[in-house]
Amino acid sequence: MNPAPTSPAHFQRSDLPTDSGLDVVTGAFSYSGAAIARLLLQQGRRVRTLTGHPNRAHPDLGQPIEAFPLAFDDPTALAASLTGVTTLYNTYWVRFARGRLDHEQAVANSRTLFHAARRAGVQRVVHVSITHPTIDSPYPYFRCKAFVERSLAEVGVPYAILRPAILFGGDGVLLNNIAWLLRRLPVFAVGGNGSYRIRAIHLDDLAGLAIAAGRNRDDMILDAVGPERPTFLELVAQIREAVGSRARIVKLPGPLLPVLSGALGLALRDVLLTRDEYHAMAEGLADTEGPPTGSTRLSTWLTEHGDRLGIEYANELRRHFT
């Protein structure tokens, strides 16, 4: 097997055929997909979404959009829903295994989607991946993300791959729930020494990168990262200050943090942080050394939004599995 692409490819291609003016965003009623769809609409594009949650309460996108099911079990219907589309913006993925849906199944679903796009004549695919995906990663999330990138590179549709680490802005889960815990608990535990860095990008910066990549004419891979790289310990301290918390931040031996997170998850009926997520973060997989591709400073955003951050808990299971 060939390795997944790890740097921008340099294959020139001819200009796109006549632009239909219609784009598809997978998950436009969710988080990053909603930001991409909203910006496309603001720029005068027609937008359709493929979604696994057609009955979910829709975010305010500025105007109604067509919704079709992510019919992975019906490739013909999936291709029909992509007919006449110029660019497919793909945000489909699963954060953790749940029930019969795991990362391997998400790879197979993604491959089905890419082949349906080729069959439908989609002219370009912009795919949201993750920083540091590798085929030999010990973490299924990162390993399977690499297999998805490989599938996209092999399907024969011109593509762009964006690799964010952590997103912030909007109704994001991670920073909000850290703030929620800091508001309510007297102690907040950080795994290990907390020196591992976090390279987050604002949701709107990611959307801007995605749409710019949709207009590009070359196959490309780009880290989608912001200008700041705080350590996790620094990030928690920034959130604590932003929300006016008096919680004490303590360092906990790394192996104990997923255990504590699991116990809190049971109490909240949610998944706060998986073992793999903690170890991947502690190994530096949420950080990059390259230049920033987003401009919004995380520290500034926290200062401006601290009074609203963590007021309500964001339940991941309720959002995606109910």
Image (cartoon, helix red, strand yellow):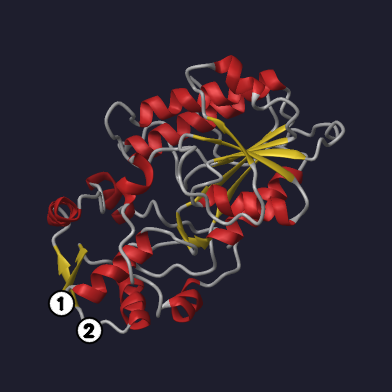
Q: In x, y percent, where is residue 231?
A: 35, 68
* Amino acid tagged 2: Arg
Q: In x, y percent, where is residue 288?
A: 47, 56
* Amino acid tagged 1: Pro
Q: 16 or 291, which lies in front?
A: 16
So how many labels did they put on this image? 2
Separation of marks 2 and 1 at Cα, in angstroms: 7 Å
Horizontal side of residue 235 vs 253, given as left or right = right
The residue at the point 36 percent across, 78 percent down is 238
Quarter of the image for residue 50 reads top right
Q: Relative to residue 291, is residue 125 depicted above or below?
A: above
Quarter of the image for residue 152 reads top right
Q: In x, y percent, where is residue 322?
A: 33, 41
Residue 260 visible in the displayed image: yes
The local secondary structure at tag 1 comes to loop
Horizontal side of residue 96 vs 224, given as left or right = left
Q: Is the C-beta separation of discs 2 and 1 under 8 Å?
A: yes
Number of residues whose C-alpha sits closer than 10 Å to that of mark 1, classed few (under 14), some (14–19) or many (20 or more): few
The residue at the point 64 percent across, 26 percent down is 81
The local secondary structure at tag 2 comes to loop
**Which numbered disc, 2 or 1, marks the residue that appears first in the sequence?**
1
Which label number is shown at residue 50?
Answer: none
Horizontal side of residue 91 vs 185, given as left or right = right
The residue at the point 28 percent across, 34 percent down is 98
Where is mark 1, residue-wise? 186
Where is mark 2, residue-wise? 246
The residue at the point 36 percent across, 55 percent down is 284
Q: In x, y percent, where is residue 88?
A: 65, 36
Q: 73 or 239, which lies in front?
A: 73
